Image (cartoon, coloured by chain):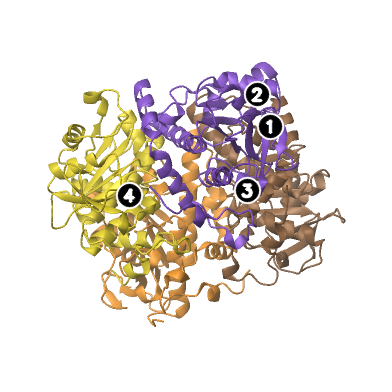
Chain colours: A purple, B yellow, C orange, D brown
Amino acid sequence: MTEIAPRQVSEDLVLANHILSNEGVLDAFGHVSVRHPSTTDRFLISHARAPELVEADDLQVLDLRGARVAGGERRSYEEVAIHAAVYRHRSDVNAVVHSHAPSVIPFGVTGVPLRPIYHMGSVIGHEIPVWDIAVRFGDTDLLVRDENQGDDLAAALGARAVVLMRGHGCVVTGADLRAAVFAAVYLERDATLLMAARGLGNVRELSIGETARAAAMLRGHAGERAWEYWLRRLPQRDALGGGAGRVSKKELTGAED
Amino acid sequence: MTEIAPRQVSEDLVLANHILSNEGVLDAFGHVSVRHPSTTDRFLISHARAPELVEADDLQVLDLRGARVAGGERRSYEEVAIHAAVYRHRSDVNAVVHSHAPSVIPFGVTGVPLRPIYHMGSVIGHEIPVWDIAVRFGDTDLLVRDENQGDDLAAALGARAVVLMRGHGCVVTGADLRAAVFAAVYLERDATLLMAARGLGNVRELSIGETARAAAMLRGHAGERAWEYWLRRLPQRDALGGGAGRVSKKELTGAED
Amino acid sequence: MTEIAPRQVSEDLVLANHILSNEGVLDAFGHVSVRHPSTTDRFLISHARAPELVEADDLQVLDLRGARVAGGERRSYEEVAIHAAVYRHRSDVNAVVHSHAPSVIPFGVTGVPLRPIYHMGSVIGHEIPVWDIAVRFGDTDLLVRDENQGDDLAAALGARAVVLMRGHGCVVTGADLRAAVFAAVYLERDATLLMAARGLGNVRELSIGETARAAAMLRGHAGERAWEYWLRRLPQRDALGGGAGRVSKKELTGAED
Amino acid sequence: MTEIAPRQVSEDLVLANHILSNEGVLDAFGHVSVRHPSTTDRFLISHARAPELVEADDLQVLDLRGARVAGGERRSYEEVAIHAAVYRHRSDVNAVVHSHAPSVIPFGVTGVPLRPIYHMGSVIGHEIPVWDIAVRFGDTDLLVRDENQGDDLAAALGARAVVLMRGHGCVVTGADLRAAVFAAVYLERDATLLMAARGLGNVRELSIGETARAAAMLRGHAGERAWEYWLRRLPQRDALGGGAGRVSKKELTGAED
């Protein structure tokens, strides 16, 4: 096991990768990171590989400029600037998910506001801005590749939980890793439900007060219950091998509640 | 095996938890309960954990105020008031499902009437009210947390089979556990089909007479056939262990018809 | 193995049950039958159980009035009158599927014509009538329970391949079992695609000539290729036991193409 | 192992068959081919069987008229003329996928332009023509059966990456096999997202410049990352046997990055 961070932090980040893949938030692309618990101007993230395949050995430590400082020289994701920028600008954020979750793309390209319509969606916040890289940077490959672009994205995010990226995906933040995973999953669910509801008729969204109260409630025990459930749903891949770095699921899902 | 209720009752409640998860009605959240067969002012429900993971050891007995009377002190779901209220107000109801089934949320937030459009959907009844917690309780976290809120919800339900909860989910009742599971599953299916049908054109719903006749028919052998099918579809989780409390599927799915 | 029919006929009917379940055409309900190869005023169908669970031991022989003549006294599906009526009226039909396939329900309740929009859908024919049991029989439980209702349904079907049943499902016929399975699967696919296409804009359907030519083409090798594929996709259920009547998949999928 | 081509080429083509099936692009029908690496007026493709079941032994070598020149006499797909035509007309293309991917059919029958709406979709190119076989060939079974039809289709494709076929499916090309697989998968994803987005409101598509830049970016490391992910998602079918020709997944998925 690598010693780039406390073992529990690495293991949770590996599981976050697998959960987000298994729940349909990430596919071969997208990534999730967590701020280093003691060295808070560092964060952990896998080198460039599909989240579904990430193991503890794949994790690296990067600084807030996106430079590798531990975990070897394997190539980074091309968009570590997203994570670095959010950690620079938001001291309250300790975990970041960048995804191309299918249900959020339509909101990013139409400008239709994505809002919580049920209590589970409240974790995404009442207001979700859409950031368009073309406004300041013109025609690009849509990737956030440097500090300027990262700063611009972080400015659009502001103090909110989520920002959509036009023609690309979204960024979801959390006070800790499980909160970010929770918000990323329920962002996807809420967006799916809102599309269906708009197909039926005029939609009554959660009020600002309801959103705040429900989100506060979900910061309680809900995260643990969901995490335990998502772990149970992970496919078992022992037959494909997995190597010494494989975190044992059995080991991690012992005591509950 | 716990002795808080006859073994068959506990086993069926465990399986109801697993079936409702596997059929897409429950995820990490939502819950299912059954009235105690002999002490009818009590009901059985799991302590607060994802239904997919519930085993016989997790079950507790609560009274109709939602207080734990057997099965240990582990924390209850925050909304046991839903179940308690329905059992208080409806002596004909012996099982209750509370879910956030994806297809019902859009009806709750648009006010578009959710009705049966095919015979399998008839079990939900001709009329499904929408209860909005905000009408009497203003901005909340949407959860039903006390007897007042439970009474208000039960009043909206009235003598019907199902009530939707705006921005939250639904409550489905049954004369017995399998009937409640059956109605919860086909509520989800009917809602999905109605959304699709409305996208095509004007929808001919079942008439009141058809709804009553088809529902009566489905109270016959249909429940057993579906239950046997849903059991077969459950994933096998032996490789993940499961503990002594695990109900053996092989044991429960002997010969039927 | 039962001797109510040649072994290959029984085995294929078992597999047809499993394939139609696995491909999302049948769930706990619906059924598939095949005309007896030598005694053509008889047909084979399971007793009343979910198609996913049907094994060779479950098959019975019925006459064209729906009465059991071999395979024991276990209760029949309540709608064997559908199968009996089609075999009575259509000597060219040797297999019948009755399903509640989700994508066909919306067409039955809106009257929007369900037509083939791509070559694979051509097997359903250019014209698909909708039969409404209420026209002649008023408020019912929607089930086809007797010869009168069966005759009325068969009259609506006429010489066509498929008939929809308002508020209920559909009947799909075939010259042989694999053709009926093929048509039932691609009916479901075509209906799904047509709903999506209508959401986009005006739909160009296959012409009458294209439908006839493509359907003739698909009566060639396509059926075998699809059957082999659907067999491969069946879940392996050995771990759940299955009993002596279980048809070995390995045994049946030997030589190909 | 056959020696009709270098082993790695055959193995990749087998895996491409399995990946495209597993990712929902191909079902029992559709096919994928690759130009022979040394004899460039030849291409490799399976004989006529479902892609999910293709193994190395099933591969044959065809010339650019669609005639078999190696790999035995088993019957070819009826539409090898598609592949032959594209290889004749496009020396820059070294792999071809023909699919009936569900999400592309609606665009082919409505004429609604299918365009990239997010960076992952850029690989399909800014403009996707729709070819209608009826324009020159009248009522057919929709299959591309000869050189004339193949030439007509290739002319519609022109220098682009993708062409839709009205009432039938699409053709996707690539500079190499993995690029064609990548484009076929993300064509399906982009089409799905565009349908959802159009249901919400007016859609901002990628600009021409964005499409070109993002596609160039995706020609980098993205293909390897996705390929590794798709391999991991393949079902394990060892329990069904598979025979000597089965390419071992374990063997092929060593270390990557």
- Label number found at residue D219: none
- Give the mark toward the camera: 1 or 3: 3
Q: Secondary structure at mark 3?
A: helix
Q: Where does the image place residue C178, in percent across and percent down from the top left?
A: 49, 65
Q: Vertically, is A46 above or below B71?
A: above
- Give the mark toward the camera: 4 or 1: 4
Verify CB contact (< 8 Å) between mark 4 and mark 1: no
Q: Secondary structure at mark 4?
A: helix
User: Pointer 2: residues within 10 angstroms few (<14), some, or many (20+)?
Assistant: many
User: Pointer 1: residues within 10 angstroms few (<14), some, or many (20+)?
Assistant: some
The one of C183 and D4 positioned closer to us in this rendering: D4
Q: Quadrant of residue A26?
A: top right
| Amino acid found under the numbered disc labelled 4 | Val
Q: Chain of mark 4?
A: B
- Label number found at residue B185: 4
Position of residue A128 in the picture relative to residue D232 (left or right) = left
Q: CA distance from mark 2 to mark 4?
A: 45 Å
- Label number found at residue A150: 2
Residue pointed to by mark 1: D127
Position of residue D129 in the picture relative to residue C211 (left or right) = right
State whether residue D100 appears in this view: no
